[in-house]
Amino acid sequence: MTCEENRTILHAYLDGELDAPRSAEFEKHLENCAACVRALEAQETLRSKIRHADLYEPLPNDLESKIRRQLREASAPVPKRFVWQWLAAAAAVLFFAGISWRYLPKFGADSGLSASAFASEIVDAHIRALQPGHLTDVASTDQHTVKPWFDGRIAFAPPVKDFAEEGFPLIGGRLDVLQGENVAALVYGRRKHFINVFVWPERAGEAEQYTGSKNGYNWISWKQGELRLCAVSDTNRDDLNALKDLISR
């Protein structure tokens, strides 16, 4: 394996998430590659510094008095007229929220506001996955290992394929959550980047395909059969389109 491919699984190796053959292959590569050894040592040093860092933030001295004052204010009697006005307003909000929930697609939308919320959640999920120990629940380049892992965990079958020969090696998969529902996440490598491909059942009202970017991260979402897929990464959009074409073929 090349240094580029091995560095995409470095975090998984440190977290003990690689299967035995993959771990042995990685360690064999380390025996003859000083650059990868240095990269591994750098990550170990960084993790050690984080573990031993003093991240304690002292509480403000007046915190207790503020909490007690707020509790007293909250327990003060409320005029009945205000209560009825508040209940009427709350009922109206719930009514319109129910209509919005019924008629707006749950993942993504064509409206600017919904698209912005979708972009924020999908990018946040990608960034969260890059934290140590969160990238994969099953770490393997073998699609016949990753795909069966999802059986019984979700009610649909994600399209798991390895594209190492095309420059997109499969790293593994995991379960993730978007808007309160379980989705599949397939993880691919691209040079020194990670690409998360989120998969969930297609919902009525979603566009055939749409793209976007937020805070330096690009994403592309498309329909494939009865599934909706969304690839997100800090790599360029051409890479995401290339991976989309590979998955869709």
Image (tube, helix red, strand yellow):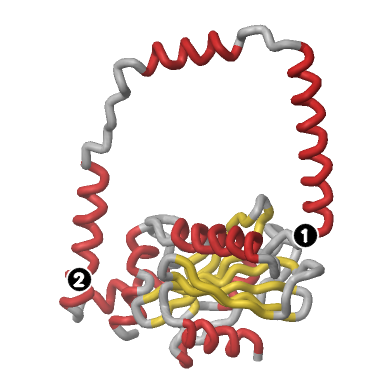
Please give the residue where the numbered disc 1 appears in the rendered image.
Answer: 104
The residue under the point 50% across, 72% down is: 213
Quarter of image, res 62:
top left
| Image disc number at residue 114 | none
> The disc labelled 2 sits on which kind of residue?
Val
Of the two numbered discs 1 and 2 in the rendering, the one whose residue sits closer to the viewer: 1
Up the image or down, 191 lies above or below 122; here it is below
> Dot 1 lies on which element?
loop
Residue 95: x %, y % from top left: 83, 42
User: Does residue 187 show up?
Assistant: no
Please give the residue where the numbered disc 2 appears in the rendered image.
Answer: 37
> The disc labelled 1 sits on which kind of residue?
Leu
Q: Could you say which is closer to the camera, residue 140 or residue 43?
A: 43
Q: Is residue 150 left or right of residue 168?
A: right
Residue 10: x %, y % from top left: 33, 68
Marks 1 and 2, Cα distance to the nearest angstrom?
50 Å
Q: How dense is the environment of label 1, judged by Cα within 10 Å: few (below 14), some, or many (20 and up)? A: some
The residue under the point 76% across, 62% down is: 105
The residue under the point 79% across, 26% down is: 87
Q: Could you say which is closer to the camera, residue 4 or residue 109?
A: 109
Q: Where is the N terminus found, in terms of image quarters? A: bottom left
Q: How dense is the environment of label 2, judged by Cα within 10 Å: few (below 14), some, or many (20 and up)? A: some
**Number of on-image labels:** 2
User: Does residue 237 show up?
Assistant: yes
Residue 82: x %, y % from top left: 74, 18
Up the image or down, 64 lies above or below 204; here it is above
Residue 223: x %, y % from top left: 71, 78
> Dot 2 lies on which element?
helix
Q: Is residue 90 left or right of residue 233?
A: right
Quarter of image, res 156:
bottom right
Earlier residue among tags 1 and 2 = 2
